[in-house]
Amino acid sequence: MSSIPVMEIFGPTIQGEGMVIGQKTMFVRTAGCDYSCVWCDSAFTWDGSAKEEIVPMSAAEIWKKLNELAAENFSHVTISGGNPGLLRNLAELIGLLKENGVAVAIETQGSCWQDWFLLVDNLTISPKPPSSKMNTNDQVLDNIIARLTAENRQDHISLKVVVFDEDDFQYAKSIANRYPEVPFFLQAGNDDITSKDHAALTGKLLKKYAWLTERAMADKQLTNVRVLPQLHAFVWGNKRGV
Ligand SMILES: C[S@@+](CC[C@H](N)C(=O)[O-])C[C@H]1O[C@@H](n2cnc3c(N)ncnc32)[C@H](O)[C@@H]1O
Ligand SMILES: Nc1nc2[nH]cc(C(=O)O)c2c(=O)[nH]1
Ligand code: SF4
Ligand SMILES: [Mg+2]
């Protein structure tokens, strides 16, 4: 039985982002990422600062932990990271959750393909804009979207681009144009990921969200778009495990 590097398991909480925003969900956060986005709000999953908290767990152990935390109080689990898309062995966990009537969401940046993407109820692919300092491999992303659409997964996937500035907005538009068949979300960036001043942070996030909303509304080439903030950041600020 192969193990999964788990950074944290928490919930129930609301899904604060993207295609199922507001959904009551549990989170399983895996450790390790192939990127190092400068503004990553979960850098502890890959920068070594919490490496002693990483626990290798089997699918059965994760299921047990979820039930210890929230027995009979969840029907949706979000697997995020780090990049869970790096893990070849997630099919067993996804199968176990689905056998138990639990829907499964994944958050990944779209830097690598896994066959188990086809089993996921809500697959969010979040390619990274210039402000992250990461480069998207267009061929890899094309291949991921092509395989998912070929298997008729359109209703189970979305693209979500975080935007901090005008360059990011132009990048986001290029993604929307490249994959017009995939539901498309813009997400306002949080540029103060260490602040503990909730009121100040909320003010900043609202301003960013207002800018992004107005920018998107003014753009006639971008009509089929949904613009969202990180809802959990408004409720709980930069707190971990919520
Ligand atoms: C922490 S990542 C983990 C999953 C995967 N590595 C990815 O990036 O999609 C989850 C989501 O948070 C977003 N995110 C990370 N830092 C952010 C920030 N400072 N502001 C807004 N969104 C952020 C990412 O773009 C991604 O959509
Ligand atoms: N509530 C809540 N919603 C989220 N949506 C995506 C998250 C993530 O870190 O992937 C996240 C998170 O960490 N918390
Ligand atoms: S890809 Fe996701 S987890 Fe990895 S560094 Fe970027 S935002 Fe963080
Ligand atoms: Mg998060």
Image (cartoon, grey):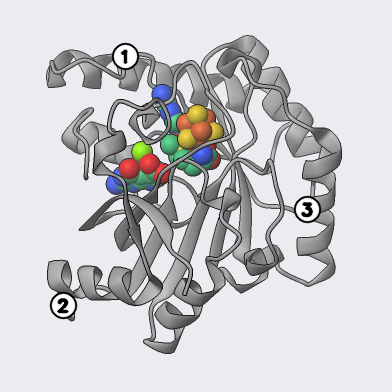
Foreground: 77 or 178? 77
Q: Are marks 1 and 3 in contact (CB under 8 Å)?
A: no
Q: Residue at x 16, y 77 (%)?
A: 71
Residue 217: where, in percent of width, then height?
A: 59, 27
Determine whether the residue tagged by mark 2 lies in a helix, strand or loop.
loop
Residue 140: where, in percent of width, then height?
A: 80, 43
- Spatial separation of the CA atoms under disc 3 and disc 2: 35 Å
- Callout 1 amino acid: Asp
Circle 3: is it few (<14), some (14-19), or many (20+) Cα within 10 Å?
A: many
Q: Earlier in the sequence, mark 3 or mark 2?
A: 2
Disc 3: which residue: 145
Q: Residue at x 56, y 72 (%)?
A: 91
Disc 1: which residue: 192
- Work out whether 84 lies above or below 120: above
Q: Ligand 2: does it lie within 8 Å of the C-beta at label 2?
A: no
Question: Is residue 227 among what the camera can see?
Answer: no
Determine whether, in the image, residue 153 is placed left or right of residue 225. right
Determine whether, in the image, residue 102 is placed left or right of residue 148. left
Residue 180: where, in percent of width, then height?
A: 79, 47
Residue 136: where, in percent of width, then height?
A: 73, 29
Q: Residue at x 20, y 29 (%)?
A: 237
Labels 3, 2: front one: 2
Disc 2: which residue: 71
Q: Quadrant of residue 236?
A: top left
Q: Quadrant of residue 153?
A: bottom right
